[in-house]
Amino acid sequence: MLARKGLLPDGFLLTRLAEDQNQPNRSHFRSQRARFITKTGSCNVAHKNIREQGRFLQDVFTTMVDLKWQHSFLIFTSAFLCSWMLFAMIWWLLAFAHGDLEPRDPDNNPGPVPCVTAIQSFTSAFLFSIEVQVTIGFGGRMVTEECPVAIIILIIQNILGLIINAVMLGCVFMKTAQANRRAETLIFSRNAVISTRNGRPTFMFRVGDLRKSMIISATVQLQVIRRTVTAEGEVIPVCQLDIQVENPLRSNGIFLVSPLIISHTIERGSPLYDLSAQSLATEDLEIIVILEGVVETTGITMQARTSYTPEEILWGRRFVSIITEEDGRYCVDYCKFGNTVPVRMSSLSAKELDQTQGVQEGTSESQLQGWGLVRAGRGGFRKGGRTCCGSAPQPWYAQSEKQQKDAEQKGQKKKVQLEVIGRQVEEDGLRDVSD
């Protein structure tokens, strides 16, 4: 439909068709797994066994606006026809009670003045009711001063007709100016990706606006819906968790002047922290995207929604660039809006990567501190002695001195090393020779 209106180029639709053909297996899982938000943004939730139906009648206007167009037209037509028929019956009864329906004298003698002229049957009363309510005056039928009741009925029908017209026009205006109509020109990438950005796994998707009129104060919210089990064993089928959107402004606000890539860094505290390439296919979750803002031309608050299931999240891929600079202005190529390219990325989850990097960081610190001097012999030291415990290796004499100090503090006997005894024997022998 958008292509026929000229809003989307043919290449964009061809790209979408190519993406669908490249993923034949994903459609099978997508048809089996239920989702809360469809790709078009509508809520895929059926409400059953609602006993308090009368609550919808307390807000008739909203109920009529939410109805489909065919049902709205049926209600509009029924409302006008019922009001015309009701007052036609009232005008016919008034004419019957006043005697206006009795046949006139054939000699054209002036009879009593009727309440409404030119009413001889129910058909003429129905035509007069239509003329009164829609303010069409053909000049053949009119109310006279004979019956004050007729004047009161005329006033009541005019007031009721204005109320019906106001309600019907308001419903038509609200249905044509609904905020979700503006959301039809906001597009999201069919697939989301997880790739490395600045050394961290990042969840990303692309959003764009096809109209030149901007969305003021646009904000993006991400939520994860998944089935969770509490510590007490309670099963929560729908658990909503917020996801922080990465933005240098430290807020969820965006300036949607061109297609943007919305990202979320997967780190500690993220609902996707345990997600890996192997567990992605078996995860039972749904990531919902909500974009809210004010329409610049009408000032109406709008909301666009979409969702991504595990089958629609691509691991180890990133979006291609679609913005180029030509003749002093930026150009956006929507044919490449959903195109992705593979990147080198580990299949481990962010949690597993943090655990691995934590071990490596610990060993790297020990490497810097553990390269010391180790005794190579009696006369010197050599470099080496890398340890895994995180502390630098100590020479043999430092260890012996430490043991001696510990023994003295504990009141134990002083332990003498063999090399120390050998030194004392050599010194005693030299003294005897000198003597």
Image: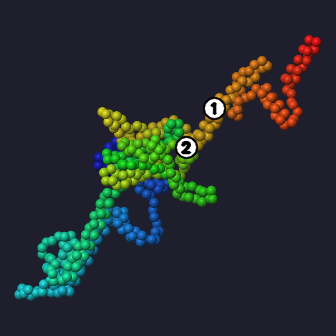
Dot 1 or dot 2: first in sequence order is 2
Above or below for 139 versus 224: below
Question: Where does residue 378 sit, x and y in percent of width and height?
Answer: 79, 19
In this rendered view, identify the residue nearer to me: 378 or 5.
Answer: 378
Amino acid bearing label 2: Glu
Q: Is residue 241 visible?
A: yes
Amino acid bearing label 1: Ser
Q: Left or right of 275: which side holds 430? A: right
Q: Left or right of 70: which side holds 46? A: right
- Residue visible at 36% across and 48% down? 215
Quarter residue 118 falls in: bottom left
- Residue visible at 41% across and 47% down? 188
- Residue visible at 39% across and 49% down? 217
Question: Where does residue 192 sit, x and y in percent of width and height?
Answer: 46, 45
Which residue lies under the disc numbered 2? Answer: 267
- Residue visible at 20% across and 86% down? 97
Q: Left or right of 413: which side holds 187? A: left
Which residue lies under the disc numbered 1? Answer: 364
What coloring was used for the rendering?
rainbow
